[in-house]
Amino acid sequence: MKLPLFIYIFFITISVNAQEENLLQKKQDSIYIDELLSNINRLQSIDSSKQAVFEALKLAQKHKFIGQQGKAHKILGVLYASDYKKLDTSNYHFNTSLLFLRQAGDSLASFDHANNLSINYIHVNDMPKALKYAIDAVDISKKMNLESDLKKKYQGAACLLLGTIYADMKLNDSAVFNLKKSRLYFKDIKSSQQFVASNNIATFYLEQNQYEESKIYLQEALDGYKQHNSLDGIVYTLNSLGDLYFEISDLNKSLKSYQDALTNSAHTNLYRYRLNTYKGLIRVFSKRKASDSAIKYLNKAFDLLDSTEAPKLKVDILKLKADYLQDLGKSEEALSYLKLSMQLEDSIIKKENLPKITTILIEQEKNAGLEEIKDIKKLSSKKNYWILGIVSLLLVLGVLSYFLIKRYRNKLDVSDTTKNRLESSLQLEKENKEYINRKLVSTTANLALKTDLLDQVNELLDQIKNQPKQNLNKEIRETQNQIRIQQHLDSMWREFFTHFEEVHPDFLDSIQSRHGITQNDLKICAFLRMNLSNKDICQLMNVNPNTIRVSIHRIKKKLDVPTGVSVTEFLSVD
């Protein structure tokens, strides 16, 4: 029974509406995911941030949004990095993020991955691994195909992290070199990050008790932050200046710096910086024996302890409280605060340089998404194009299927070709190895010939000694001929080592790197690696057996060959 045309149109209309609704829902979910990820840094706690990211990740997985899955995993890596016990979980999310972001064509994915893993290992004080990934980040930043200013930005960030790690490892020259290099990169592009680098350089010099150098860079950072009206930077730098003046016992300037920092921090919510300011003021007033002022800021510091995540500062405040109580003669209370500070100090791991969670989507992208939704709504109102759209879709699917099948067949052909090339390559490699082995045997035989020639020259010289003077010319000519041959054969050793290295790559380098190994030892080691007997080696090198035995014994000591293992067995292990 043939259905009327309007029934076909009815079903097609339902199908198109369903597709449009699905597309509209995907766009709305995509925008919602971006909003969740971009507002993470506004949430009150890490747990609530994780919950929001997992919600975004679940939606992104539902619609198979590759890029958004990568961003969600990257943020989860940062959040889990705040707890050093969750380092493995953090690394898992960073590694997963790298896979998704590479698929999404993110050119910065590899840099972010190396940078974040380096910071993770700083948290747990695994500086060798932190250094490895920081060096990777520097190498990646050099190879980035970006415009000049953007490339310098990432190079500056990489050098800043690397310099910080070198400073922590007490590699002072490398630390200063990279920190100053970072500062120059940021200075070239007029980035405010220049002053972060200056601050880090100043902190390094302060730790090295190089106060004048530290003061120069702190003043540069302070002037730059004031020019950019960056309250965070101003407060941080003023606190550092207060620490510097305190170290050189200039209490008036130290107090002035801390008071300026306190005034500026009143306009921000930087509790950690304010807590650091209170700590500095407590130290100054304690040194001045101004107990009332010291206890005033000590109480203010304690009021802030629960409002900030700065464990090291908490340790310092608890110790200052213990010192204050001890000065008052309250030993038991002082001891309780000291115990608290020690417990907290034992439970924390370095957490400097935690990466900040950045805004994932800029406002322009949101606006673009809203515009696309408006376009879809307009399209849905144009019902006259529904049937044309379905027909076009079918045509596209047909063409796409044709190209997919053709591509699959081409892949099969390419696979067969690749297989044949691989087999040919393996055969050539096998033949090349056999050729090299033949050359090595040939060279060894030539060395034996050289030994025979040496014996002949020696015999001729013995004959010359016993001949009358008038008959010497003939023997001398013969001796010269033998020497010329000998000179030609001197190249045999070089050729021997060349072919030997092709058969046993890196063998000679690994032996030669040992202390005390001579050129003569290398020759003996090479012959032993070829499984030649002592007798064969004696003939090739024209020495007596005792000399070879003594040489092998010395080689055994130089290579630290274990007792009960022969040198030949030791050298034969791959």
Image (tube, rainbow, N blue to C red):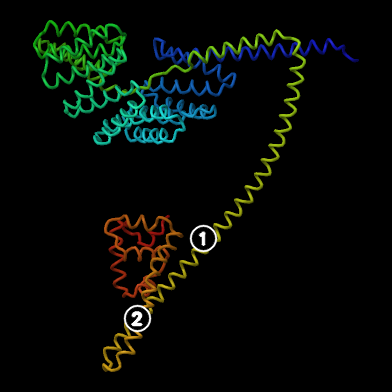
Helix, strand or loop under label 1: helix
Residue 203 at what x, y percent from top left?
23, 25
Write down the residue under mark 1: 433
- Res 125 quadrant in image: top left
In this picture, is 326 found above or below 491? Answer: above
In this picture, is 261 found above or below 502? Answer: above
The reply, left or right, for residue 338 in relation to residue 84 is left
Residue nearest the observer in this picture, 359 or 75: 359
- Res 471 quadrant in image: bottom left
Looking at the picture, which amino acid does disc 2 mark?
Answer: Asp
Residue 455: which disc? 2
Residue nearest the observer in this picture, 224 or 286: 224
The reply to whether callout 2 and callout 1 are in contact (CB within 8 Å) is: no
First of labels 2, 1 by sequence position: 1
The reply, left or right, for residue 314 in relation to residue 407 is left
In this picture, is 175 found above or below 282? Answer: below
- Res 18 quadrant in image: top right
